[in-house]
Amino acid sequence: MTQHFTAPDRLTGKTGTQWWRDAVIYQVYPRSFADGNGDGMGDLEGVRARLPYLRDLGVDAVWLSPFYASPQADAGYDVADYRAIDPMFGTLHDADALIRDAHELGLRIIVDLVPNHSSDQHEWFKRALAEGPGSPLRARYHFRPGKGADGELPPNDWESIFGGPAWTRTQDGEWYLHLFAPEQPDLNWGHPAVADEFRSILRFWLDMGVDGFRIDVAHGLVKAPGLPDIGGHDQLKLLGNDVMPFFDQEGVHEIYRSWRTILDEYDGERIAVAEAWTPTVERTANYVRPDELHQAFNFQYLGAPWDAAALREVIDVSLAAMRPVGAPATWVLSNHDVTRHATRFANPQGLGTQLRTPGDRELGLRRARAATLLMLALPGSAYVYQGEELGLPDVTDLPDEVRQDPSFFRAAGQDGFRDGCRVPIPWTVEGSSYGFGSGGSWLPQPESWGKLSIEAQSGDPDSTLELYRRAIATRRAHPGLGAGSDVRWLDAPEGVLAFARDGFVCTVNLTGRLVSLLVPGRSLLASGPFTVDGDRFELPGDTTVWWTV
């Protein structure tokens, strides 16, 4: 039995603030943030000790990637017990202390929820295998007989996101569905016990005091009736471009409407955020209708190239899609599943979001700083992935023998280079694992980490860390920034973006050359140096300037 705690007092006594509409939310990948017990693996104790840093950074909420009991076949996204903490991360008491400390510091806590699949070590699945065909527990997953004379072929042609078939055959001859790794069997959301269990899990963590949930694979819970074939191979190329029989089915919305009623029962404005890969931003908007979820990640923005026309289009489309449903747009540049944007922008455009080449480091950092100020100037909520405030690049030269991304070990599928953005972040210039912990680091850190550390950058007015601190503080203080639903585009030369909000102007030069523009007001903040000459200013390439007007 796990102890069930009572929620602490909420952050404020106010109601109706809708804090999520302009929140800056910081993603913590627990195993790579801070190691509190010196075993080389980040943990909740480490996160708790570093909460004052996040308060001082100025963020509103902290999203924690999974810390549940798990065999760690996919870095905790294979959950064996949704109400227990994996011993590598700590205990429920550690989670309770972290939540309480965060609230005392004015930070909200969002936890990852993984409802599309469980671990193959979940009690339900272990019993389903042990009891064999006909077990009632098999109906809670997708078990099927195979095709072929002896059932030797998978039930359909679906492919795993991690490569290879999406089906694994059991010793008794039946097959089970796993859209990700074989250790992550998909749950059958057509079974009432699954829906009941997750409503209970929501309440467990809400009673613990969490402020919301990030819903992993929110688009994947419901599969098309009959599990029809797709036809053809290379199905991964269709993801995000077309409606698939296992993704973005209409039935998911009934689930989220039921979850919204639970969230609304609790005080403190608890929220849910969808990780929903959909073909269009308009379909993403379906997840944030007034009676469903509060936010959805904007993957179209994350994947946009460093190009003025492309970014303007995705900004316009994103804002237009959210307006009819009354939801805030969200903006994100990096997360635990993609190459850090300081490295993506260092490489030629069009290479995707998983890269293994370092590119031009100086160019990448310059663009990353400019992209950050653009993102934080847009109306809505913004997400920051741990370490991006340090300008960290992806570690692109990890030896194959240290990699742990399960998709790296599959015969096909996505590139499997996610470990590069998961290397533990540096806190100090020197010392064991650059201050990550006293017992080394579960992934090797590059020698350059020390000069990029929080210690090295703190107090340096030209550092990327201080740029983030100033930008987030200015965003909170300026009445024209934060929540909103539109921007007013201003005339600008080709390759330059300029837009106005209430008393505010943002100018971004996405070209590689110097551009001369009229001074729109008093400068507030810039991603790099620029010069003013009378009523005009010279804006260097890959530079953003904020103005108050």
Image (cartoon, rainbow, N blue to C red):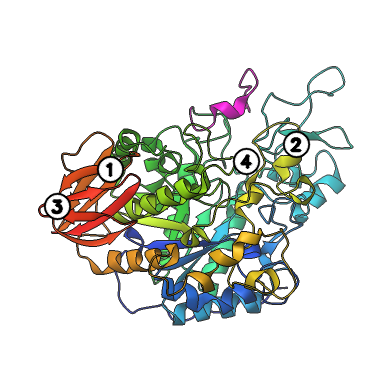
- For the question of whether residue 7 can be seen, the reply is no
Residue under label 1, please give it.
Answer: 514
Residue under label 2, please give it.
Answer: 410
Disc 2 or disc 3, which is closer to the eye? Answer: 3
Please give the range of residues in magenta. Answer: 225-241
How crowded is the residue under tag 2: few (<14 C-alpha within 10 Å), some, or many (20+)? some
How crowded is the residue under tag 4: few (<14 C-alpha within 10 Å), some, or many (20+)? some
Find the distance from the CA under tag 1 to the CA under tag 3: 15 Å
* Quarter residue 502 falls in: bottom left
Disc 1 or disc 3, which is closer to the eye? Answer: 1
- For the question of whether residue 489 can be seen, the reply is yes
Residue under label 3, please give it.
Answer: 519
Mark 2 secondary-structure assignment = loop
Disc 3 or disc 4, which is closer to the eye? Answer: 3
Mark closest to the chain's N terminus, 2 or 3: 2
How crowded is the residue under tag 1: few (<14 C-alpha within 10 Å), some, or many (20+)? some
Residue type marked 1: Leu
Disc 2 or disc 1, which is closer to the eye? Answer: 1
Residue type marked 2: Arg
Residue 230 belongs to magenta span: yes
Residue 121, how many percent across, how many down? 78, 54
Magenta residues: mostly which secondary structure? loop
Left or right of 376 on screen, residue 179: right
Residue 233, how many percent across, how many down? 65, 21
Find the distance from the CA under tag 2 to the CA under tag 1: 46 Å
Contact (CB < 8 A) between labels 2 and 3?
no
Residue under label 4, please give it.
Answer: 356
Contact (CB < 8 A) between labels 1 and 4?
no
Q: Residue at x 66, y 50 (%)?
A: 419
